Amino acid sequence: MGWAGRLFDARETFVRILLLDLSGVGYLVLGTPPGHPPTVPQWILAVAAFTVALAAHRRPLANLAGQTALLAIAIAVLDDTTINQVGAGWALVELTMWAGRPRVIWLAAVALAAVTLLDSIGTTLRHFTTGVLGLAVQVGLPLLLGMVVRTTREVGRQAAQRAVEEQRRRESENRAARADERSAIARELHDVVAHHVASMVLRVGVTRHVITDLDPRVSEVFDDVHSTGTAALADLRRLVAVLRDPDAVRGDAALTAIEPSALPAALGAAVDRARQAGVTVEADIDPAVGALDAVRGLAVLRLTQEALTNVVKHAGTRALARLSVSVRDGSVHWEVTDDGRGATPTPVPPGGGHGVIGMRERVEVLGGRLEVGPTGTGWHVATVLPAAGTPMPAVPSPSRRAETVDGSPTPERA
C-alpha cells in the first residue's frame, strides 16, 4: 500500500484532518482575493471548524453535524464560506467512508444539501438553479469520493477473504494428499519391511528350537534378537495403523504410539538392554510417567533408547550412565548423563534411532529444546517436554565443556 492508500486508512483520520486544517489556514493567509483579507467572524468560524474537525476526527457523524451547523451560521453572516463548505464536504467524505449503515450517509447528505440551499432561498430563479447545480460539488463530489474509497476497501476485504479461503482449500487438499501418501507408505512398509522382519524372527525362533546344545551366552543373544524382532513387528503394526489414520497423528509429532501404562516397563527394558551391553545404568524414573499422553510417552522412550545407545557406542563398558525422568507441573524433565570413562565401545543394544539430529527434531516438534554437550569427562543430554499449551521451560545445560587427557575438546557424538 502506497502513501496515498495509507492516507485513507481508518487509522490515519487525524493526519487527514490535520492536513485539511493546515490547508484551510493556508487559504485564509494566502488564498483570499486581493484587497479582501479574512474578517474576524471568518477567522472565528474557521477556527471553530478546525477545532471541531480535530476533536471529532474519530466520530464522523458528530463531525458532520458540527460542520453543517457552522456552515449554516457562515451562510448567514459571511460573504466567503469556502472554509466551512470544505469542512462540511470533507466531513461527508469521512462519514461516507466509515459509516456502518448506508441510510445514515444518505440522511446526512440530504441535511447538508438542505443547509447549502439556504443561501439560494428567496433569491432569483437563476440564482436558485445555480445553487442546486452547485450541490454536485458541495454534496455529490464528497459522496462520490467517499463511495470510491468505501468500495475499494470492501473489494480489498473480499479479496483478502477469498485468499484466506483459497489457502484453507489448499491446506485441505494437502492434508488429503498427505493422507493418501500415508496410506501408500503404510501398504509399502507392511509389504516390504514387515515380511522380512517376520521372516527373521521366525528363523531365529526355529534356530533356538533346532539347536539344543547352544552355549548359554549364544542362547541369550538369540533370545534378545527374537524379542527385539517381535517388538519391531509390534511397532510396525502401530506405524501402519497410524499412517492409515492421519487424525491419529498430532501435527506429525509421532508416527507410532505407546500405551501410557506401559511406558515405565518400556523404559526399564531399555535400561536392561544397556546393562546387558555392559554399561552400568542408574535409573530414576518417576512413576507419574505412566500417566503421560501417548505422543510424549513415545518421545521419552525413543530419546532414552537413543541416548543409552550413544552411551554404549561412545563411552564403553566401564561407563556409568544416569537416567532421570520426572514429571513436574505437567512437564516431562528428561536427562541422561555419563562419565565417559569407558575404554572400548561395546556392541550397540537395539532401540536406537537417527542420532542427535533425530532426537532434536522429535523434541522440537513437541515444543521442547534438546540440550546436548560434554560435561565433566562424559556427556549430557537433557530436555523438557512441556504440557500442551504451556510455554517452553528452560532446560539445564552442561556444567562445562569436557576435555580429553591431552586437553583437546571432546568430539561431538553422533
Image (cartoon, rainbow, N blue to C red):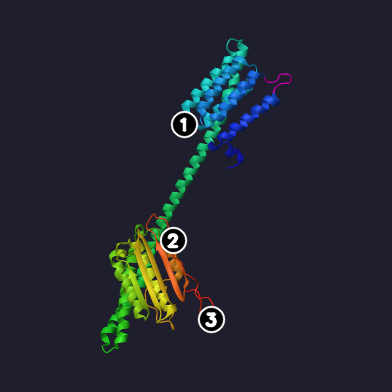
Residue projecting furthest to the right: 35
Magenta stretch, main secondary structure class: loop
| Number of other residues with Cα within 10 Å of mark 3, as a class: few under 14, some 14 to 19, many 20 or more | few
Task: Tell me the residue that label 1 is attached to.
Answer: 100
- Amino acid type assigned to the residue bearing label 2 in the image: Ala
- The circle drawn on residue 379 is none
Q: Where is residue 112, by image quadrant? A: top right
Residue 337 versus residue 81: which sits nearer the camera?
337
Report the magenta residues as a range.
32-38
The residue positioned 56% from the left and 18% from the top of the image is: 72
> What is the distance, in whole Å, between disc 3 and disc 1 at their CAs?
78 Å
Q: Earlier in the sequence, mark 3 or mark 2?
A: 2
Image coordinates of residue 63 in percent, x first then y, are 53, 26
Vertical relation: 104 (above or below) 307? above
Q: Residue at x 64, y 22 (%)?
A: 43
Of the residues under marks 2 and 1, which one precedes in the sequence? 1
Q: Nearer the viewer, mark 3 or mark 1?
A: 3
Q: Which amino acid, by three-letter code, is at mark 1? A: Gly
Q: Is residue 327 visible?
A: yes
Neighbourhood count class around disc 1 (C-alpha, 10 Å): few under 14, some 14–19, many 20 upward:
few
**Mark pair 3, 2: CA separation:** 33 Å
Taking 226 as reference, is 410 left or right? right
Q: Earlier in the sequence, mark 3 or mark 1?
A: 1
Q: Which residue is label 2 attached to? A: 394
Q: Secondary structure at mark 2?
A: loop
Residue 73 covered by magenta stretch: no
Distance of mark 2 from mark 1, alpha carbons? 49 Å
397 in relation to 83, above or below: below
Numbered mark located on residue 406 in the image = 3
Residue 355 horizontal/vertical position (percent): 44, 71
Locate the N terminus by quadrant. Answer: top right
Please tell me whether mark 3 sits on a helix, a strand or a loop: loop
